Image (tube, grey):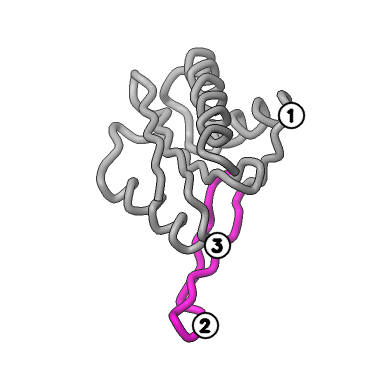
Amino acid sequence: MTDSEAKDITNTIRSTSFDLHAFLRSGHFEKVYENGLAHRLQRIGFSVRQQFPIKVHDIDGFLLGDYIADLIIDTEIIVEVKACESLIDAHIAQVLGYLRATGLRHGVLINFGAPTLQIKKLVL
């Protein structure tokens, strides 16, 4: 995926998130926003996988642990959904860890829990 394609998809994720937040507002559990975003992105033609398993291996291939990413869009962009007061550095580190573990370059961190939607695009 080119950076231009990733930018276009990210812009669609961003606008879809704003529409969903305008409809639902803050106050729901994270899973509600995850399901809503997945539904709306699938409805406009994206391939969306929810609760995508990510395995983390050591240099010799030994399995160190597992993560679960909220969404993978078109097998190229990881989306992590939050419903909290505000994003913190640990949330950014989480998405960067997912990117390193999968070898993907593009991630989006979205917080639906604040009165104003927070979105961060991350590139590894």
- Tell us which disc is closer to us: 2 or 3: 2
Mark with earlier residue (1, 3): 1
As for residue 69 lying within the magenta part, the answer is yes
- Residue shown at the point (34%, 25%) measured from the top left: 114
Give the CA separation, mark 2 to mark 3: 14 Å
Residue holding disc 3? 54
Q: Is residue 90 above or below residue 24?
A: below
Instruction: Look at the numbered disc 1 and give the secondary structure of its residue.
Output: loop
**Three-letter amino acid code of the residue under disc 2:** Gly
- Residue shown at the point (39%, 23%) measured from the top left: 117
In the image, taking residue 15 as reference, residue 35 lies left or right, namely right
- Tell us which disc is closer to us: 1 or 3: 1
Q: Name the residue nearer the viewer: 22 or 49.
A: 49
Q: Is residue 42 above or below residue 18?
A: below
Q: Position of residue 17 (x, y in %)?
A: 51, 24
Circle 1 Cα neighbour tier, 10 Å, few/some/many (<14 / 14–19 / ≥20):
few
Q: Quarter of the image holding residue 97?
A: bottom left
Give the CA separation, mark 1 to mark 3: 24 Å
Query: Which secondary structure class fits the magenta region best?
Result: strand
Image quarter in which the N terminus is found: top right
Instruction: Look at the numbered disc 3 and give the secondary structure of its residue.
Output: strand
Residue holding disc 2? 61
Q: Position of residue 88 (x, y in %)?
A: 26, 42
In the image, taking residue 73 as reference, residue 94 lies left or right, namely left
Specify the segment rendered in magenta. Answer: 51-71
Q: Position of residue 21 (x, y in %)?
A: 48, 19
**Three-letter amino acid code of the residue under disc 3:** Ile
**Three-letter amino acid code of the residue under disc 1:** Gly
Give the CA separation, mark 2 to mark 1: 36 Å
As for residue 30 lying within the magenta part, the answer is no
Instruction: Look at the numbered disc 2 and give the secondary structure of its residue.
Output: loop
Q: Quarter of the image holding residue 123?
A: top left
